[in-house]
Image: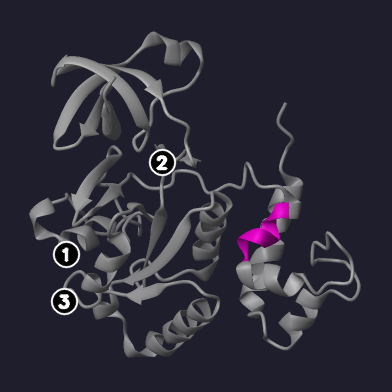
Amino acid sequence: MPEGKIIKALSGFYYVLDGEQTIQCRGRGLFRKNKVNPLVGDYVVYQAENPAEGYILEIKERKNELVRPPIANVDQAILVFSAVEPDFSSNLLDRFLVLIEDNEIEPVICISKMDIVPDSKRPGLEEYVKDYAAMGYPILTTSSVTTDGTLLLMPYLQNKTSVFAGQSGVGKSSLLNAINPELGLKTNDISSHLGRGKHTTRHVELIHIGAGLVADTPGFSSLEFLEIEAERLSYCFPDIYKTGEKCKFRGCLHDKEPKCAVKKAVETSEIRPYRYEHYLQFLEEIKERKPRY
């Protein structure tokens, strides 16, 4: 039986890439019965008499899976955050990083709209860039208008399946268009009335950029920590996890325990205070989360 990879899901059809051809398929009823739905990014077994009439017979085991947006087998996430309009938020970035780290997806941070940053905001932004680079995160500064920095993304995209993620209005589609103008992805500006971006991407689709596949998605519609346990949160903060290995007590949550190496590192700014504040905030959210039955 032939095999391929789902690169688009739309109106009940799944478009399976097999070599140079794309087969339009439907899912078999057994997936609904087993409560397993095909996702963009899935490797599947299918049968088809012609390119317009195929059926997915089997979904191969996934290495990871995101729910919102619905996509599977992602190698890395390009986290796009605008410098301004909307203003850069380290809290929101850390929230995205935790969700990505928990799914064992490699993150790449991309700060967009650098062409319109006022001089008064540049020093603070540059400090954040230094901080996250020191934590070991790849971080790029870009402009879709001047195309500065956009080509630096290309090496990260080669031979990988990447998802572009970030709040609406930060310029994800504009950035992809700057990398490859032939894409012609629909974009929209910030709503002056609402003060936030308008969603322009309506479905998940993998598109070819160079030798890689990139997902332009409607964005993350949920940023809650529904699957992360309190004991695992520090794993999603590499700077805190590394320092936490020196804690006196095994299983230290780094909030109320005595002789905590993390709290000591915060006092000396070895760990940036805002990172620790975000960690405590997320830890409290997880602790207050209602149990699911």
Q: Secondary structure at mark 3?
A: loop
Whether tag 3 and tag 1 are in contact, CB under 8 A, the answer is no
Judged from this view, the residue extending furthest toward the front is 1
Q: In the image, what residue type sits under mark 3?
A: Thr
Q: Is residue 235 magenta?
A: yes
- Observer-nearest residue: 70 or 59? 59
Q: Is residue 118 magenta?
A: no
The answer to whether residue 33 is above or below residue 65 is above
Between marks 3 and 2, how big is the CA–CA gap? 29 Å
| Mark 1 closeness class: few <14, some 14–19, many ≥20 residues within 10 Å | many
Quadrant (top left, top right, bottom left, bottom right) of the C terminus: top right
The answer to whether residue 244 is above or below residue 226 is below
**Residue designated by label 1:** 178
Q: Magenta span covers which residues?
A: 232-237
**Residue plotted at (72% across, 75% down):** 243
**Numbered circles on residues, count:** 3
**Residue plotted at (8% across, 55% down):** 182
Percent coordinates x, y for residue 108 in the rendering: 41, 65
Residue 111 placement: quadrant: bottom left
**Residue designated by label 2:** 69
Q: Judge left or right: residue 94 versus residue 69.
A: right
Q: Earlier in the sequence, mark 1 or mark 2?
A: 2
Q: In the image, what residue type sits under mark 2?
A: Pro
Q: Judge left or right: residue 263 versus residue 33.
A: right
Q: In the image, what residue type sits under mark 1?
A: Ala
Q: Is residue 143 visible?
A: no
Between marks 3 and 1, how big is the CA–CA gap? 9 Å
Whether tag 3 and tag 2 are in contact, CB under 8 A, the answer is no
**Residue designated by label 3:** 146
